[in-house]
Amino acid sequence: MRSDVHAVDEAGHTPGYVGIMMKYGGDTCLFWNDLLHAFDAQEAMPSVSASFDMDPDAAARVREDTLKRVRAGGWLVVGSCSLHAAACAAAGCHAVRE
């Protein structure tokens, strides 16, 4: 099987910020770093930004797009901020706690 690793644009948090997407066979895993700072709030309302987002509008667009892709693909996600497994499952993704 072929394995692919890609940088994923997560502009908005900080300039040049990226996540890492890994694909293996039919599975996709996304390490989305600090894409969501408050999972429960930002999963429901991606437009909610934290003070850490240097460009809140760009961060909101990236969050909304990424969440749509995660839900549609049923991806496994890993984040560096608190990720609640139950909330993630309800959003249509799978969570791994660090």
Image: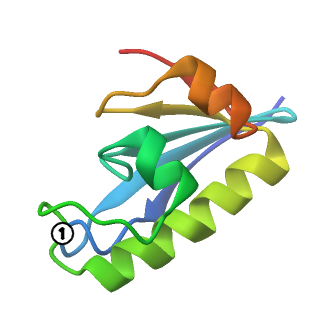
Secondary structure category for the residue under label 1: loop
Tell me where residue 96 appears, x and y as whole percent: 51, 18
Residue at 56% in and 53% down? 44
Residue at 37% in and 53% down? 35
User: Label 1: how many residues lie within 10 Å, few (<14), some (14-19) or many (20+)?
Assistant: some
Tell me where residue 91 appears, x and y as whole percent: 69, 40
Location of residue 54 with respect to 25 vertically, above or below: below
Q: Which residue is mark 1?
A: 14
Number of numbered discs: 1
Query: Looking at this view, is 56 or 41 the one in front?
Result: 41
Quarter residue 28 falls in: top right
Location of residue 96 with respect to 91 vertically, above or below: above
Residue at 18% in and 69% down? 14
- Viewport quadrant of the C terminus: top left
Asked if residue 86 lies left or right of residue 69, the reply is left
Query: Looking at this view, is 30 or 67 the one in front?
Result: 67
